[in-house]
Amino acid sequence: MGGALGLSSLKPGAVSRCASYTALLTAVLPGSTSGSSSAGFVGQPRVESLSATCASIEFLYSGDSKSVDDVYIFAKEPFDGDFSIRWGASVKVFDVSYDISDDQYIWDEMTPQGQSVTRFRILMRELPPGRKFQVVLSDQEEALLGEGLHFSEPSAYATSDATALPPATPSHLQLHRSDPRLNFDREDKSLCVDLHWSHPHLKLSNLPDDVLFRIFIQYAGEDPRMHCEDQLMSRTRNCGASLDFVTTEMPSMFATICGLRPKREVKFIVEAFNCDSKSVSASIQAVTPPSAPSVTAWLVTQAPSQGSQAGFRPTAVIDWVPQHDDLIVGHAIYLALKSIGSMKLLCWEPHGSGRGHLELPVIHKNNTYSSDAPLLRDYALRYHVHQEQEILVATRTNGNLESPLYSFSLGEWLIIEESVKCLTSFDAVNPTYAAYPVTLSWTQEQALSLYD
């Protein structure tokens, strides 16, 4: 047995059985004169897709999707005497019954009458390019020592591709602000950004032509470090998530990258690779935003000691130090509901306005809480309850990036949004009111006023 899949050239991780088992193998393995497949495997496995070094193999197995977790692959070339090589460790199986169209769902000619079977797929790796081979599958590690009842029938012969091809290069790399709820002010002053890219092949199907990604981060003057890496033979990604609801020229992904140093020149590298270990990469370079802005905030809830209460309106006062940096384009002021992750842009203050000051009208409300227990308690007592609000301030830079957030809780005071007039979007030119007042019917207004 001297072929590329024979004993003279084992792949890394392949396991061969010693000569004393050769006669036993010939007697019990499928493909021998006396072999028979087990009750688990149904019919022949099929080599459905090939590359230079990888093959996807599909097979039918009796039972449902939980009937088998992994299998072992045994391989040989045409001139090998038997399947005496176990091809590495066990391989995880994937139920592909729901990935197959109705006309391909089950190989009808191989399915016994009345038997429930499931279609699975596995990925065979590290094949020699341009070689003809055949496989059998086993559902038990030590099946070679048994009676041969844990093996499938032999597959038909297949030939791996002669040349390995690289995947398509990632394109349309862009940086965006991350979700402000993730980009909070950390002790180490690090920050987050979102990296977007496009690629024509994003679906993971456990096939040889699946495309996986690695992301590297490289600061000026330093070596690149890996941020994340997808794993072969997995249906989920470690590196990014698909933008399924965004219309672009080709499928797109994004990854939220945290732990970045503020105001540093950094290169983001997206590398695409495949099962044949071929890879290509693309990169984008930028300067990260600054750390969270220096903000002072307080509530003015009473008129000055020498002032009149007539016409006084309580306010939340927000002051921040204007930063002199060509990259800074302004400050975003968000209004959030504390502890439940809900927020929206309240006001946008461009850097060119020269302002570092904002006053927001507030109103006192009883039964205002940030935690669930007292809020639900008072609600059960039929009080009109409110979720506590907080003001968040972020510095916005070129390229639509943002610094971490400064936060200020308002306690039992709520912003009167219908009285706030400012730029309410990043594209706004003229100030508008943040919200229009909600007109309640007389009965609702009277009922609610009893509990405020």
Image (tube, rainbow, N blue to C red):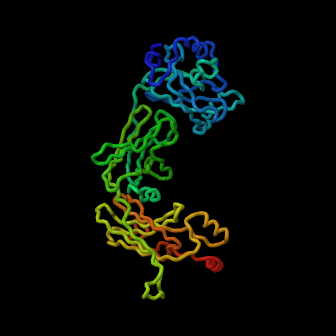
Q: Residue at x 49, y 17 (%)?
A: 77
In front: 298, or 212? Answer: 298
Q: Quadrant of the C terminus?
A: bottom right
Q: Position of residue 338 (x, y in %)?
A: 52, 64
Q: Residue at x 44, y 15 (%)?
A: 8
Q: Position of residue 430 (x, y in %)?
A: 40, 73
- Residue 417 versus residue 397 in the image, above or below: below
Residue 194 is left or right of residue 88, and the answer is: left
Q: Position of residue 18 (x, y in %)?
A: 52, 14
- Residue 445 versus residue 125 in the image, above or below: below
What is the count of numbered marks? 0
Residue 268 is left or right of residue 93, and the answer is: left
In front: 197, or 149? Answer: 149
Q: Residue furthest right?
A: 114
Residue 77 is left or right of residue 149, and the answer is: left
Q: Position of residue 266 (x, y in %)?
A: 32, 50
Residue 40 is left or right of residue 179, and the answer is: right
- Residue 133 versus residue 336 in the image, above or below: above
- Residue 66 versus residue 442 in the image, above or below: above
